[in-house]
Image: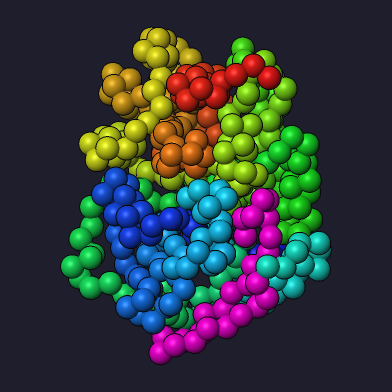
Amino acid sequence: MSDFCPIKRFDHLEFYVGNAKQAALFYSQCFGFTNTAYRGLETGSREIASYVMQQGNIQFVLSTGLTPEHPISKSVLKHGDGIAVVALEVPDAVSAYKETTKRGATGAIAPTEEEDAYGILRYSAIHAYGDVLIKFVERSDYTGVFAPGFHAQSKAHLKSNGVGLNTIDHIVANVELGAMERWVQFFAETMGFSLLVHFDDKTISTEYSALMSKVMQDGTGKIKLPINEPAQGKHKSQIEEYLEHNYGPGVQHVALASENIIETVTRMKAAGVEFLSAPQTYYEDLEERVGKIDEPIDKLAELGILVDRDQDGYLLQIFTQPVQDRPTLFFEVIERHGARGFGEGNFKALFEAIEREQARRGNLVTV
C-alpha cells in the first residue's frame, strides 16, 4: 500500500509567524539554526517574507505576510505563530497529488512548476488536520539554494552556531475529540501509511486528565505522524488547552533528533530555551526502571532529561516550554539508542509537568 505515494524524507516545515525576521533570530540564537536563504521585498517578493533556517538535515521556513489581507497574516491572527505546512520530498509531486486526491484527499495546491537558473522545482499540496497542509516537493530537477524566488544569504549570515540537532524524528498533531480515527484513516487510505502504535487513555493519563494517541508511519518508517485527541478527565487536558488557544487542530510539537542530547540541551538552555522539568525523585531509581544506560544520571537529572526503554533499546527525551505566548507549539529533543517508541514510560511524569504549567497559566480547571 505504501508505494503508491513514496516519500523520501521530511523536506521542510513552514511556520507562519507574525515577524519572520525576529523569529529567524530566535531560532538562530536559541536553537542553533543558520539562515541560508531569504525572499522578501529586497528580492522582489511583495507579499511574503521568508527565511530558510537549516541545521543538519532539518529545514524550517519562517514566513510572514506583508499585508493584513494575506492568508499568512490571517492564519497568524487566528492560530498565532505555528506550523502551517508539513513538506515531504517525493520523487514525483504530480503523481503524489493525483494518487492522494484520487483516494479522498482534498487538493490545496494543484501540481505547480517554478523555474529559475538552477532548474525546475515541482510541488503540490493537500489539506490535512485543521488548516495544516501536506506539501509534496520534487527536487530532482532543481539545484538552487531552496526554491525559485529565494536568494542565498551572504557568508555573513552563515555563521553556524548549531547545537547538534540533526533530523526531524516525528511530528505530533492534536485533533478534537472523536476526530483521531478519521485522520488515522485519512493517512492510511490517501497516503498508504500504517498504524505503528496505539496509546489509549489508560496509558496516557494522570489523576486529572488523559488523552489518546495513534502513531501513523509511511512504508519506510522515516515519516512518523502521531495524532492525539483528548479523553474525558477531571480537568481540562493539555490537548483541550491547545485546541482552545490554537482555535482548532494543528501541529502540537516536533521532535528533533540529536546524537548528544546532553550537549544539545546544555547549549539550548545556555541560550535561553526553557524546558519542562522533572522532579528529582524521577531519577532516584532510574536504572532499576530502565536498565543500564551510557549517560551519567546526575547530568540527566541536572538538565531534566527523561529516559525510557523498549525491546529495541532506550531513548532520552526532553520537551521545551511553548515557544510563543499561546500554549500551543513546542519542541522535543530526542536521542535514540535503538528504541523505536515514543517514551511511553515517561508519559505520567511528562503530563504532570505539563499540568503544573497549565496550573500556572490558569488553564487547569475542572471540566
- Looking at the image, residue 53 sits to the left or right of residue 112; the answer is left
Q: Residue at x 53, y 67 (%)?
A: 70
Q: Is residue 255 above or below residue 124?
A: above
- x, y (%) of residue 4? 73, 66
Q: Nearer the viewer, residue 235 or 110?
A: 235
- x, y (%) of residue 72? 53, 62
Taking the view exactly as shown, the residue that stands out farthest to the front is 68
- x, y (%) of residue 274? 34, 33
Q: Quadrant of residue 264?
A: top left
- Coloring scheme used: rainbow
Q: Residue at x 35, y 71 (%)?
A: 38
- x, y (%) of residue 175? 68, 41
Q: Quadrant of residue 54?
A: bottom left
Image quadrant occupied by the N terminus: bottom right
Per the picture, the main secondary structure of the magenta-coloured stretch is: strand
Residue 131 is covered by the magenta coloring: yes
Q: Nearer the viewer, residue 261 or 204?
A: 204
Residue 227 is covered by the magenta coloring: no
Image quadrant occupied by the C terminus: top right
Q: Quadrant of residue 25?
A: bottom left
Q: Is residue 34 above or below residue 117?
A: above
Q: Residue at x 35, y 43 (%)?
A: 259
Taking the view exactly as shown, the residue that stands out farthest to the left is 156
Would you say residue 227 is visible in this rendering?
no
Q: Is residue 345 above or below residue 41?
A: above
Taking the view exactly as shown, the residue that stands out farthest to the right is 103
Q: Residue at x 38, y 73 (%)?
A: 39
- Looking at the image, residue 311 sits to the left or right of residue 215; the answer is left
Would you say residue 362 is visible in this rendering?
yes
Part of the protein shown in magenta = 109-133
Please tell me how many numbered marks the rendered image carries. Answer: 0
